[in-house]
Amino acid sequence: MIPEAGIDWDACIGLMLQAMQSLQQGLLHLLAALGAARDIDGQPAWPFALRLSGEVMLIDRSVARALLGALGYSAAALLLVALSFAWKRARIPLLLAGGALLLFTPWPDTALLTAPAVPTSFHTSPTGFSATAIVHGEQLYTRQCIACHGTDGRGNTPLALSLPVAPPNLSSGLLWRRSDGDIFWSLQYGKGGKAGMPAFATRISVADSWALIDYMKANAAGVGITDTGAWPRPVALPDIALACRSPGATHLSQWHGQRIRLVVAQPGKAPPPEDPRLQSVLLNGAAAPDTVGAIDCANSQRDALHAIAIITGTPEEKLPGTQLLADRDGWLRARNASGDWSPDDMLCRSTAVGEGAGNTAGGMDQLIAAMDADPVRFAKGGFFTHRER
């Protein structure tokens, strides 16, 4: 954050983007309630060719300042018009001043504030980014996509190189900054005409398309961490089923708002004890929750272990002993194999490595403090998203 003239522009831009997104979503739900927005796959369809977008404002702060200024001028104009009805003697001057402000307000070019939209632009995945969906998506990807996009998603296959239009890089950060609804539309209905990706609506179901998206996110995370040693863009801890001694939680998704530690069981070695700062889950543990040692909850399903292998870019046989830590918003933030935690274990940062990391010699307390001081700020579709699901 760089202060300018005493104004926290990052905070102002963030609030404005939240307001823009809430305005669009509210309009969509209102149109759906009035019957003016058709239903597609159980969710209301966006009826316009354009949508508001914060993509340019996230890159060029001057555009955001111009928009904030225009909104300020418009608010002042409306205030003058309102005052004119209460102050009869000055009604005409106030109306003229308000009208002049509205007329001469310098709005940014609409091309900088809007982006092309499709009917599913505001659709969200019904899968909850689950381990089951990720593994199912991998099977679909192997059958339908791998010939063009390759195992790493980069599209460097012989078939892809022979096409007139190269397929998109599925490991690219640019792709994963698009909204999930836009990606879903491209999968179902194709992109780029005859030379681009074909429509898959006749080959795979709606549910399969969302599972494919989940797998592509997970695979992109695994490719990224393999190449760079860190997750280059945020990835969520996938939802998995739980078997717990204490009644209540049956899935990880019920623990939103709490930090979660995932521990991959190590044969012949007792798992670490529970930690009051975290909700812990033993992965690939015993099927019966009363035999998982000190950790209250476990998951023994193969899908869960395999999904974590995809996300971490690590073969399943090398995962035992690995621990993963997710923050209160569900984003995976840290990985450790020794049990001696420090801020150096953070593999997902909003700041550059070394900035705001604090004391890298401490333990879990320092790691948690570093995570809390550096919350995930990830833009999808031009707007910040706080949770994957």
Image: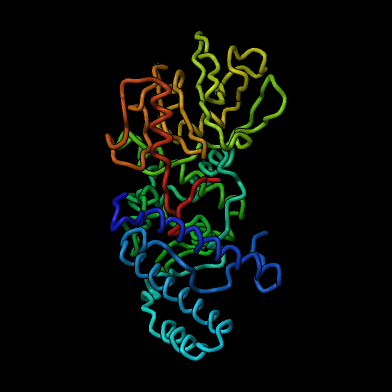
Position of 268 compared to 292: left or right? left
Residue 283: percent from left, percent from top: 55, 23
Q: Nearer the viewer, residue 13 or 226?
A: 13
Q: Nearer the viewer, residue 232 or 11?
A: 11
Q: How many marks?
A: 0
Residue at the spot 43% in from the left edge and 59% down from the top edge: 382
Position of 41 compared to 61: left or right? right
Residue 299: percent from left, percent from top: 60, 25
The residue sitting at the front extreme is 89
Residue at the spot 52% in from the left edge and 36% down from the top edge: 328
Position of 86 compared to 171: left or right? right
Image position of 271 with respect to 163: above or below = above
Residue at the spot 48% in from the left edge and 72% down from the top edge: 50
The residue sitting at the top extreme is 268
Residue 278: percent from left, percent from top: 53, 25
**How is colour applied across the structure in the image?**
rainbow
Image position of 238 with respect to 179: above or below = above
Q: Which image quarter holds the C terminus?
A: top right
Residue 85: percent from left, percent from top: 58, 84
Q: Nearer the viewer, residue 349 or 1?
A: 1
Image position of 264 with respect to 198: above or below = above
Residue at the spot 42% in from the left edge and 62% down from the top edge: 54
